[in-house]
Amino acid sequence: MSEPKPRIVVTRRLPEAVEAALSERFEAVLNPSDTQMEAGALAEAFAGADAVLCTVGDRIDAAAIGAAPRAKMVATFSVGTNHIDLEACRAAGLRVSSTPGVLTDATADIALSLILMAMRRCGEGERMVRAGAWRGWTPTQLLGRDPTGATLGIVGMGRIGRATAARAHHGFGMKILYANRSEVDPGMPAERRELPELMAQADVISVHAPASPENRGLISAELIARMKPEAYLINTARGDVVDEPALIAALQAGRIAGAGLDVFAQEPQVPEALRALETVVLLPHLGSATRATREAMGMKCLDNLAAFFDGRALPDAVV
Ligand code: DGY
């Protein structure tokens, strides 16, 4: 008799091709309703799991881990791991994998979209047209700023930071400043700055720092206060890397020109104060949301799970 297949609990719907491949290789317990699993449902689903395939919407904390006594691995369908208590995983002897590399371009594309939308006031224009409020072309309507030739400050020069810088520099002739723990070779002219200096010098600042505990509130009220009044803040990393209330206060007071946000501190809640601001472009965490990227992310989860259960090294080990 053949060995039973490892049981993988999958917390959300995944692209069809990924669910099919997972079901072929494992006993995949899928989530056909695609609803977010609250703590109770998560605990119930995890009870018999040999591994868990989770997403950024799940909270994999000590309680969730405790509810999965059989589980040996967590494969997260994300590059970020801030939704997982990595220490608790270590303590429980759980391996953790993520999906680096495959979402770099898609996320950099969204960062660039936010830069363009914020600087050229596309959200405001779109809302005006949809509301039937457009009364025709005028020479002074919705005047924005030119991304071309502007100075872009990249906070966190990892893969996505570098890909955003490349698009901005090669596509729009933007001057690139970056703040990063170490000097990197971005493959283009770029000057390293201390973060406070970068905040004061850039016309648009794009945040790409990971949501580690030490980066919580990294873009603080003090740093936001250093921004030029005509500057924009873009965030495609994680909401809690930016002091959200301080950003809202700066925007409400008109102390900075605008913001483009794909991520929020308490997703999916987006503060009413942000939604009320015309100068902010808001997206629902779309960074990696292309079909090809999401399939590649799923296949990475599958590869890591297969490696683990075959006794091979994890290609994308976090823990
Ligand atoms: C990630 O992978 O961490 C993104 O935020 C979701 O794709």
Image (tube, rainbow, N blue to C red):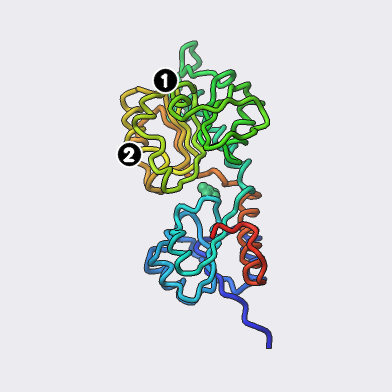
Say which residue label 1 marks: 228
Residue situated in front as seen by the camera: 15 or 160: 160
Percent x, y of residue 139: 49, 11
Above/below status of 257 relative to 297: above
Q: Position of residue 125 (x, y in %)?
A: 47, 26
Residue 235 spot, x, y in % from top left: 47, 37
* Nearer the observer, 15 or 86: 86
Q: Which mark is residue 272?
A: 2
Left or right of 71, for residue 278: left
Q: Quadrant of residue 169?
A: top right
Q: Residue at x 42, y 59 (%)?
A: 59
Q: Is residue 264 visible?
A: no
For the point 47% across and 27% down, which residue is it? 129
Please tell me in which quadrant of the rendered image residue 251 appears. top left
Left or right of residue 308: residue 205: left
Q: Quadrant of the C terminus?
A: bottom right
Residue at the far bottom in the pictured view: 1
Rendered view: 239 above or below 168: below
The mark nearer the N terminus, 2 or 1, is 1
